[in-house]
Image: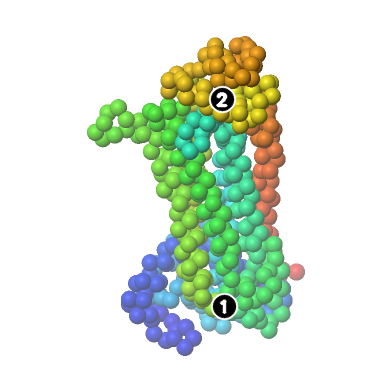
């Protein structure tokens, strides 16, 4: 393809500029930009014909080329071989129309638009697809966490504070906590979709157009909820990049915290969890190793969105509030690796949750001698015998200090020790009552208030979280995009048929 002039520029870009700015992105643009560029072109041409800005015959010719190219793209063909020099995908793309239809008709589609609003629209269309994919994977992870939590409502394990054994809890209670944050963050991330899904088309270079365009029609054909009202905002704003990246960054943080706990609990120090052979690796030198290495991949992938967020914020800082390459290309580019890495982390974590092997006996065994029921014992002295909590706390602390570390406190030893420590109180302590107080299962069942691990309470938490699922919104948004695609295709077919000789 010969290099054509473009406005006041009549020579090709400098070879270094071409190598650094245009050549490397060409194949990626064919894969990720061209399909949406074809959709935008079709919607814009249909609107121009409807508004009588373009003659029907010209519109039909443009739509014929568009349909041919689109079919080839959808079939996986490479449409354009990289020319020896060019100034970006759009110029190559428009030159193809001119080559096929001539300058008069081939370049007619660009009336009342600019690369500014086209590029802004392509970015939003690409991001919304990836965003829906990420949200779908959030919903899958949420479902996997809920399923596992329901299976382990009564699987007693130690709760931890400061990495030390704290009070009896359940694995289901822990998973419900993580799920709570995942649901909140998924909802926040989903709230960015309506911000993304607005159409910039019609804003042209940033000051609109004198042509009587129908922005609502183009928005509708492309599956947007409507146009962006202000033309400068349409091409100059990229705040939605920050909206999306912020949600991804927080989501990634949640995944790293979950991965850290799971990896610790899968270590030999705890042995609470494990995975089958197909989910772990071994060592090249240590034959005994079974490494839950995928959790490290999860953490590595999860943090990339945070870095991209920081880069995007710095890229936006002090830029003029209008379209610029720095804003439209450089800042927006941070979205795609962040979405890809977060989606990978979500899929890996869902896979791990679906295949985890829980070891209830190791969890229960860890509780022996860990003194996790001492808070329950202090609460018992308050509720049953009327001690002030601080007095009860001090008495139980003294009791724990008397026994050897790692040994289990028996009901008999508890009674004898407390009788001596609380001699002045003359409490009528009963060993059978103390046995119930010191039983981790009964401690868990008693903790029904304050969002505690009592199985019925956690089941209620899980039911409430299920009711907050983002899945219905995702299904509705996906359906809207599918319906818009069908409407656009039918509109193209109808417009082309009307221009056929003999058509009524």
Q: Residue extending furthest front?
A: 424
* Foreground residue among 199 and 243: 243
First reached walking from the N terminus: tag 1 or tag 2: 1
Residue 287 seen from this side: yes
* Foreground residue among 145 and 215: 145
Vertical order, 227 against 299 (above or below): below
Mark 1 surroundings: few (<14), some (14-19) or many (≥20) residues within 10 A: some
Mark 2 lies on residue:
395
Q: Are marks 1 and 2 in contact (CB under 8 Å)?
A: no
> Quick check: 490 left or right of 78?
right
Mark 1 lies on residue:
322
Vertical order, 452 against 332 (above or below): above
Residue at 35% x, 30% y is: 290
Q: In this rendering, which labeled residue sits more in front, label 1 or label 2?
A: 2
Residue at 45% x, 52% y is: 303
Q: Residue extending furthest bottom?
A: 8
Residue 242: name its quadrant: bottom right
In three-dimensional space, the C-alpha distance between marks 1 and 2, rounded to whole angstroms, equals: 69 Å
Residue at 59% x, 63% y is: 240
User: What is the x, y in percent for residue 470?
Assistant: 65, 46
Residue 329 seen from this side: no
> Quick check: 354 left or right of 380?
left
Look at the image and name its color scheme: rainbow
Mark 2 surroundings: few (<14), some (14-19) or many (≥20) residues within 10 A: many
Residue at 51% x, 36% y is: 161
* Foreground residue among 64 and 481: 481
Residue 267: name its quadrant: top left
Vertical order, 167 against 13 (above or below): above
Q: Secondary structure at mark 2?
A: helix
On-image quarter of the C terminus:
bottom right
């Amino acid at each position: 393809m010969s290099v054509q002039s473009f406005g006041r520029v009549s020579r090709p870009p400098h070879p270094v500029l071409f190598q650094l700015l245009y050549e490397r992105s060409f194949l990626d643009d064919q894969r990720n930009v061209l399909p949406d560029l074809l959709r935008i072109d079709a919607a814009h041409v249909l609107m121009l014909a409807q508004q009588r800005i373009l003659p029907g015959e010209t519109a039909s010719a443009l739509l014929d080329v568009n349909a041919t190219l689109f079919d080839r793209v959808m079939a996986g063909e490479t449409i354009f071989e990289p020319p020896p020099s060019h100034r970006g995908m759009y110029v190559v793309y428009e030159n193809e129309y001119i080559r096929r239809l001539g300058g008069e008709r081939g370049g007619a589609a660009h009336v009342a638009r600019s690369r500014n609003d086209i590029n802004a629209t392509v970015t939003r269309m690409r991001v919304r697809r990836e965003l829906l994919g990420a949200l779908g994977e959030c919903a899958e992870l949420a479902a996997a966490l809920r399923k596992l939590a329901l299976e382990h409502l009564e699987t007693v394990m130690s709760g931890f504070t400061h990495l030390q054994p704290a009070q009896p809890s359940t694995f289901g209670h822990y998973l419900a906590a993580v799920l709570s944050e995942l649901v909140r963050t998924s909802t926040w991330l989903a709230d960015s979709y309506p911000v993304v899904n607005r159409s910039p088309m019609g804003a042209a270079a940033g000051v609109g157009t004198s042509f009587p365009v129908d922005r609502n029609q183009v928005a509708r054909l492309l599956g947007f909820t409507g146009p962006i009202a202000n033309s400068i905002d349409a091409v100059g704003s990229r705040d939605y990049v920050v909206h999306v990246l912020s949600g991804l960054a927080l989501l990634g943080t949640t995944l790293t915290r979950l991965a850290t706990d799971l990896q610790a609990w899968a270590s030999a120090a705890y042995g609470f969890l494990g995975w089958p052979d197909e989910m772990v690796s071994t060592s090249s030198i240590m034959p005994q190793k079974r490494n839950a290495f995928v959790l490290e991949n999860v953490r590595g992938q999860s943090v990339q969105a945070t870095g991209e967020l920081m880069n995007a914020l710095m890229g936006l800082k002090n830029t003029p509030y209008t379209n610029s390459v720095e804003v439209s290309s450089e800042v927006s580019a941070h979205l795609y690796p962040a979405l890809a890495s977060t989606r990978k982390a979500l899929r890996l974590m869902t896979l791990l949750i679906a295949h985890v092997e829980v070891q209830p006996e190791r969890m229960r065994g860890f509780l022996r001698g860990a003194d996790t029921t001492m808070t329950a014992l202090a609460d018992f002295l308050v509720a049953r015998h009327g001690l002030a909590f601080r007095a009860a706390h001090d008495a139980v602390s003294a009791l724990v200090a008397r026994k050897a570390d790692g040994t289990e406190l028996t009901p008999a030893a508890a009674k004898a020790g407390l009788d001596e420590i609380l001699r002045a109180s003359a409490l009528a302590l009963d060993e059978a009552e103390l046995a119930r107080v010191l039983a981790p299962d009964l401690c868990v069942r008693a903790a029904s208030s304050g969002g505690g691990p009592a199985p019925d309470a956690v089941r209620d938490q899980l039911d409430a979280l299920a009711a907050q699922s983002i899945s219905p919104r995702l299904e509705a948004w996906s359906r809207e995009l599918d319906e818009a695609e069908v409407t656009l295709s039918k509109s193209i077919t109808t417009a082309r048929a009307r221009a056929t000789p003999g058509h009524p």
